[in-house]
Image (cartoon, rainbow, N blue to C red):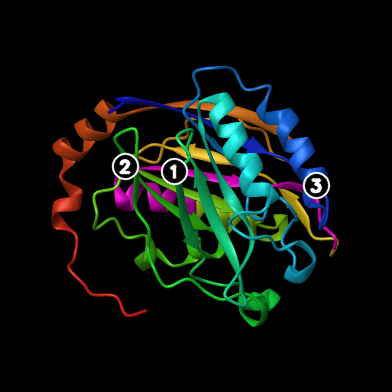
């Protein structure tokens, strides 16, 4: 168990529907991260941008990107996570993967497909909420549009860290800012959001606003908007436990069942 988790957020532009180029560019960014980082977080669809042409970029769980992530995670001695387009059983998924240095891979398929862009027409929605343990930290991975649905993120599992990866456009960035902070406060958890910057192939603009909040909703990072940059934050389990025990807000949460 690690009482401290060092997390690197990579806020970057993405080359449209070009997995090979994006892997090369991200490889360079990841290799600049100093030793001692435990977890590296990439944006949603980090090999392609938010494409509705999955057949052009889809890979399998034994494809080039997963192999690359496994090699890089081992070399950096850090887990790496982000989402990419995966083809499986004749379906396409917007799948979050977390590849650990040991080779263990955790996956989460985006539950709330973005109907405004027609994501539900080409991608199969996930049905399972995932909580996984890494270095003694219980982590809940979610993807972009999931952020608008607080019931799906509700902390009934006593997880320690909530992570969203996204391609969240500049035009609606105020919602991203407000909802990430709310998720941290209402769930008494660290909350990380990693968003991209730049223009995509549909000329949508992204301004980043990647961020880390503590359990009280205080911002912990120093990332600037509109700029490609990497930030490293230090999460402390003792601080999380102290506020949960002092305030006891999670003890008063409502009981409910969720139909999927």
Q: Eyeballing the image, is 240 above or below 86? A: above
State how far apart marks 3 and 1 are (Cα). 23 Å
Q: Earlier in the sequence, mark 3 or mark 1?
A: 3
Q: Which residue is outermost to the front?
A: 62
Question: Residue at (84%, 65%) from the top-left corner?
Answer: 202
User: Which one is closest to the eye, mark 1 or mark 2?
Assistant: 1
Circle 2 residues within 10 Å: few <14, some 14–19, many ≥20: many
In the image, is 201 to the left or to the right of 236? Answer: right
Q: Earlier in the sequence, mark 2 or mark 3?
A: 3
Asked whether residue 13 appears in the rendered view, the answer is no
Quadrant for residue 90, please give it. bottom right
x then y, percent, for residue 82: 58, 48
Q: Which residues are magenta?
A: 179-201
Quadrant (top left, top right, bottom left, bottom right) of the N terminus: top left
Asked whether residue 11 appears in the rendered view, the answer is yes
* Magenta span includes 193: yes
x then y, percent, for residue 185: 34, 47
Mark 2–mark 3 contact, CB under 8 Å? no
x then y, percent, for residue 66: 61, 48
Mark 3–mark 1 contact, CB under 8 Å? no
* Magenta span includes 219: no
Quadrant for residue 218, please give it. top left
The residue at which mark 1 appears reads as: 104
Question: Residue at (50%, 30%) from the top-left corner?
Answer: 78
Q: Secondary structure at mark 3?
A: helix
Specify the label residue 20 is tagged with: 3
Q: Secondary structure at mark 1?
A: loop
Question: Residue at (67%, 48%) from the top-left corner?
Answer: 65
Question: Residue at (32%, 60%) from the top-left corner?
Answer: 154
Given residues 118 and 33, the one toward you in this image is: 33
């Amino acid at each position: 168990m690690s009482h401290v988790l060092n997390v690197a957020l990579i806020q970057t532009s993405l080359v449209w529907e070009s997995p090979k180029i994006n892997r090369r560019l991200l490889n360079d960014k990841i290799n600049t991260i100093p030793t001692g980082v435990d977890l590296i977080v990439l944006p949603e669809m980090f090999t392609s941008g938010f494409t509705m042409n999955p057949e052009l970029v889809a890979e399998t769980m034994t494809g080039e990107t997963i192999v690359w992530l496994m090699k890089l995670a081992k070399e950096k001695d850090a887990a790496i996570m982000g989402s990419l387009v995966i083809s499986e059983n004749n379906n396409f998924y917007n799948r979050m993967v977390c590849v650990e240095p040991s080779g263990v891979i955790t996956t989460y398929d985006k539950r709330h497909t973005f109907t405004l862009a027609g994501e539900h027409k080409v991608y199969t929605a996930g049905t399972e909420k995932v909580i996984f343990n890494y270095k003694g930290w219980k982590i809940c991975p979610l993807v972009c549009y999931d952020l608008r649905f607080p019931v799906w993120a509700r902390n009934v599992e006593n997880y320690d860290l909530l992570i969203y990866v996204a391609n969240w456009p500049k035009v609606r960035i105020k919602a991203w800012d407000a909802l990430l902070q709310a998720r941290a406060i209402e769930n008494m958890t660290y909350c990380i959001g990693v968003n991209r910057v730049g223009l995509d192939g549909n000329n949508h603009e992204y301004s980043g606003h990647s961020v880390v909040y503590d359990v009280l909703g205080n911002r912990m990072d120093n990332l600037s908007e509109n700029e490609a940059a990497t930030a490293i934050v230090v999460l402390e389990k003792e601080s999380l436990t102290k506020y949960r025990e002092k305030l006891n807000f999670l003890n008063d949460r409502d009981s409910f069942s969720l139909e999927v």
